[in-house]
Structure formats: structure tokens, C-alpha cells
Image: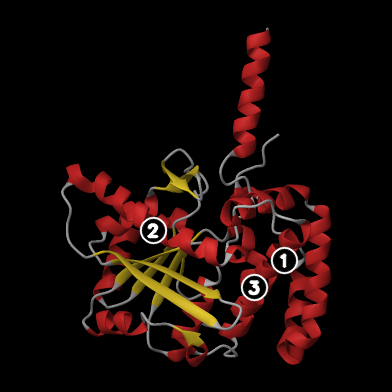
Amino acid sequence: MTDPHWSEARERGSAWGMQLLFSVYRFGGRILVYPVVCIIVSYFYLTRASVRRHSARYLARATGHKARALQVWRHHLAFARALMDRLDAWMGRIQRKDVDFPGHQTLRQLQADKKGGVLLGAHFGNLEMCRAVVENDGSLKLNVILHNANTAKFNKVVERASQRSGVRLIQVDDITPATAMMLKAKLDEGEFLILLADRLPPGNTQRYFSAPFLGAQARFPTGPFWLALLLDAPVFFMAGFDTGSGYRARLVPLREAGRVRRSERDRACQTMLADYIEQLEQLCRAYPLQWFNFFDYWGDERSAENSTRSDVTNEQ
């Protein structure tokens, strides 16, 4: 049986457990918490066969060879470390000077000109860490549009790390014409919008672009690309990640501001998607442990299940 949609996955771990871990982390740092995190990661690694399976399939596509058990475990551990980086950033332990961000000045100039932009990110590395760094630095204003219903417990922990962490989180399912007008107003004030564009949103899995990604067809949501187009603002690919020797943020322009005729919008979205995938593929191949989509992303099990049903029907 195939897994449920990613948004239906329950957030594991109790709220009090996360709060306790955060308290220890806040006062003891990684020295005290890291061994505990390794134990927790190992527990989930051993008890969630489907997550191990999906991780191994992704790593095989990204690296070109079969993933060993140790590499899959390291993939799990990288996700936990990304969460700690997120807390570190909001607590001010990771600062602007700690992140190599060549595109920072580009965004600052746009903001100075009262011209915001749309930043298309992915579940790669730690984009939230970048947001915390620039907000703590006070240089940029970023608004994150995402679905975080199944990470509510962790978000409460983040709120304790920084009172500013939840101010500009906008739920995907809240985007209405009125919301779109509000987002446009933010862009006109020189603020920026972050949308994650590598995962289908809950309740809207039928509208997607199909495109090759790491050697196989994958589904990408239409919403972020259409919204970016309709808001008539410059569009960038953005990712923040740990290189192993330091933090880095990548900013790559995907499209300049400008209206597009209705008849040409689909082609414009497809062009943005192709450039977006090119950037994401480069990062996944260079830093394979940094991409965090632990579900049947390419529909391998869905295809196998459909094939089995077809065989059974034919036999009947």
C-alpha cells in the first residue's frame, strides 16, 4: 500500500519532549544535545521502514549508486542537524557573518528600491535558517508561505527561540484573492516572499507540472510558479545549506519582473520550472544529504501498485 500524502503524516514526538530538548539545547548547546539527537534519529531510523526506503531511493538517484544503510542514517541525521541549525539561527548563534551569501546585496538593492521579489525555495538544507539570519540582522524582510500544520509542535519550539519567528508565516491554504492583494502590497514595500516549490500542497494534488528531476519524472506544484508570475515581481531560486565547511546561501535569478499575456503564462511557468529544477539538481548532486523529502516523491510505489492491479485485472 502506498504512503498517505506527506501532509497527512503525523508529527512524531511529544510537545513536552521537544520543549525539554530545547531547554537543554538553549543552556547546554550542541555538546549536551547532540548525543541525544543521535539516539532519537537512530530510533526513528530503525522504526520507520518506509522513510528508510524513500531516503535510499532518493540518494541512489542523486549519487548514481545504491545507497548503503550508513548513508541513509546520515541522511536522517542531516535533517536533525538542520533543525538544530534553525534554532541556532533564531537564537542568534548563527549570524549574518557566518553565512556566505553572495546574493544578499542584490536583495538589499531591490528592497531599497521598494521592489520586492519572490524566492522559490525547496526542502533543501535550511532556508528558514537564512530567513532568521537576515531578519536578526535587520537587513531584509521575508514572508514565508508554507504548509506547516504537521510541524506545529516544532514551530512552537521555534517561537520560544525568537518572538519574531512566527510573525510572517502564511499558510498555503489561506491564499485567496484578498491574500494575493496583501502579498502584492508587501512586494511593493520591498519585502520578499518565500515559497517552497518542490512538493505538492495538501488538498491540491491534481494540479501539477510533470518534469524530469534526477533522472525520473516528478510532480511539481503549479501554485508557486503561477503566483510568482501573477505578482509581477522578479523571481529567484534560493537555498540555504550547510556545505560541511560552513553555511552558504545561493540566490539565482529565474525571471525578471514583467507582465505576461494569459496565452503565454503556462510556457513562462514551464521555463521557470526548468531553471528551478536545474538549480535544485545541482545542489542535490553536490550535497545529497541536504534534501529532505522522506516520502514516495517519484511515485515508485504508486506505479508499482497500479501495475500490480493492472496485472490482476488482466488475469481476471
Name the residue: 57% across, 47% down: 297
Query: Is 112 situated above or below 312?
Result: below
Q: Are marks 3 and 2 in contact (CB under 8 Å)?
A: no
Q: Which residue is mark 1?
A: 74
Of mark 1 and mark 3, the one earlier in the sequence is: 1
Of mark 3 and mark 2, the one earlier in the sequence is: 3
Horizontal relation, residue 112 to residue 85: left or right: left
- Inter-mark Cα distance, 2 to 1: 26 Å
Name the residue: 57% across, 62% down: 291
Kindly tell me whether residue 12 is visible in this rendering: no
Query: Is 279 situated above or below 107?
Result: above
Quadrant the C terminus occupies:
top right
Q: Which residue is mark 3?
A: 83
Q: Looking at numbered disc 2 in the image, what kind of residue is underneath it?
A: Tyr
Name the residue: 63% across, 55% down: 59
Near mark 3 (Cα within 10 A), the count class, few <14, some 14-19 or many ≥20, is some
Q: Nearer the viewer, mark 1 or mark 3?
A: 1
Q: Looking at numbered disc 3 in the image, what kind of residue is underneath it?
A: Leu
Q: Which residue is mark 2?
A: 276
- For the residue labelled by badge 2, is the local secondary structure a helix, a strand or a loop? helix
Q: Looking at numbered disc 1 in the image, what kind of residue is underneath it?
A: Arg
